[in-house]
Image: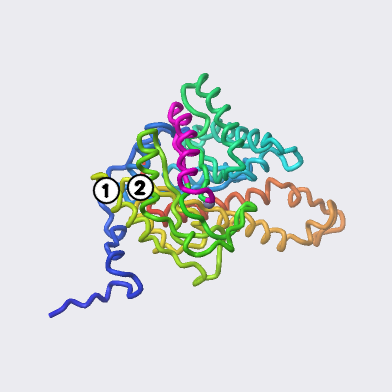
Amino acid sequence: MPVPHAHRSPQLPLAVAPRRCLLPRIVTKLKLKPGIVTGDALNQLFAYCKQAQCALPAINVIGSHISNAAMAAAKEAGAPIIIQFSHTGAQFVGGKTLDNSKQQASIGGAIAGAMHVRALAEVYGVPVVLHTDHAAKKLLGWVDGLLDAGEKFFEKHGEPLFSSHMLDLSEQPIAENIALSSERLQRMAKLGMTLEVELGVTGGEEDGVDNTGVEHSKLYTRPEDVLAVYDALGPIGNFTVAASFGNTHGVYAPGNVKLKPTILRDSQTHIQAARKTGPSPVNFVFHGGSGSTPEEIREAVSYGVVKMNIDTDTQYAFLQPIKKFMDEKDAYLKSQIGNPEGADAPNKKYIDPRGWLHLGEKGVTARLVEAFKDLGSFQKFEF
Ligand SMILES: [Zn+2]
């Protein structure tokens, strides 16, 4: 008699069904030192993530508040966190009024943001991966400036300032993408840094990069392109691949996004067969993680995603408690003196930004802890 497959969701094809996440393998917790994770340690961290079927959230930060909230989340979740600066996020750290025509605000801001995290990661007692986000061709000067600073830092401290940088040359032809990425990785490998490259275009809009009108076929990475990157970058150094499988920046109404995580699986098996590697030879990055369902996230992780970027969801998590505070305390925020408790009552304690900013920080921390759980990395580490 056929066994009914009632436990399988009808929407999911059989290939997706392993549901390994429901029966976690017994994996010894990975031991990590608090501080910035670079070089071989980062490589081992990603290898462990694939083995343990989990991934780490990568949050875009724009200043010390969000960085602190992220480190607090790593502490609560018992897992390392990836803290990353986008080009405009780094510029914001530097200050919106600064001239950025030669990337100086984005370079200085990213360095300042990294130094803040470097000074505090051990105080929080958590391991942190320091990363920079999308750098298109016109922003190569930003990454090159950070590599100049990274080389100087390496000379003094024997480790790189950042764990990794991303180049996003997905708009260029694949050969140019690979050539420019190889050049940077040669420089980065000497410092023990990892390079994230992008193949295919992440849909949606973020940080002024608008890909909402890009034709649909371009939103999906081709396995042969992943193999080409594997062949070119593998011999040079450590790299991760931001692959496009219908993922978009920002959050859209359900149904507007057709995720095809099987593209990740197909790329892994393509390389495994062509180059006779072990399973999941590539470390994948999931951009546009905000708004994804836990099922979609788990499926992507099962195909070798080790890092998931989250931005819109944490921005929202920062805003909501602050909005609630502003709404509820409206009558205390209209003047410095005078509120419903009396015409002479002072409002200083409601005005102090530390009060309401910390509410936002707590919102971000809570949202990130949820992300660690969705990604399967909650309490999977020891430090
Ligand atoms: Zn992205």
| Residues at circles 2 and 1 in contact by the CB criterion of under 8 Å | yes
The boundaries of the magenta stretch are 171-197
- Residue 129 among those drawn in magenta: no
Going by the numbered disc 2, the residue's amino acid type is: Leu
Residue 128, percent from left and from top: 47, 38
**Rounded to the nearest whole Å, what is the CA distance between mark 2 and mark 1?**
8 Å
Q: Which disc is residue 228 wearing?
A: none
Residue furthest left as drawn: 1
Q: Which image quarter: residue 298?
A: bottom left
Q: Nearer the viewer, residue 156 or 192?
A: 192
Q: Residue at left 53%, top 48%? A: 172
In the rendered view, tell whether residue 12 sits above or below residue 304. below
Residue 259 seen in the figure: yes
Label 1 environment density (alpha carbons within 10 Å; few <14, some 14–19, many ≥20): few
Q: Determine whether the beta carbon of the residue marked 2 sits less than 8 angstroms from the nearest atom of ligand 1.
A: no
Q: Is residue 178 left or right of residue 270?
A: right
Q: Reading the chain from its start, which is encountered first: label 2 or label 1?
A: 2
**Residue where numbered disc 1 is placed:** 274
Q: Determine whether the beta carbon of the residue marked 1 sits less than 8 angstroms from the nearest atom of ligand 1.
A: no
**Residue where numbered disc 2 is placed:** 227
Going by the numbered disc 1, the residue's amino acid type is: Ala
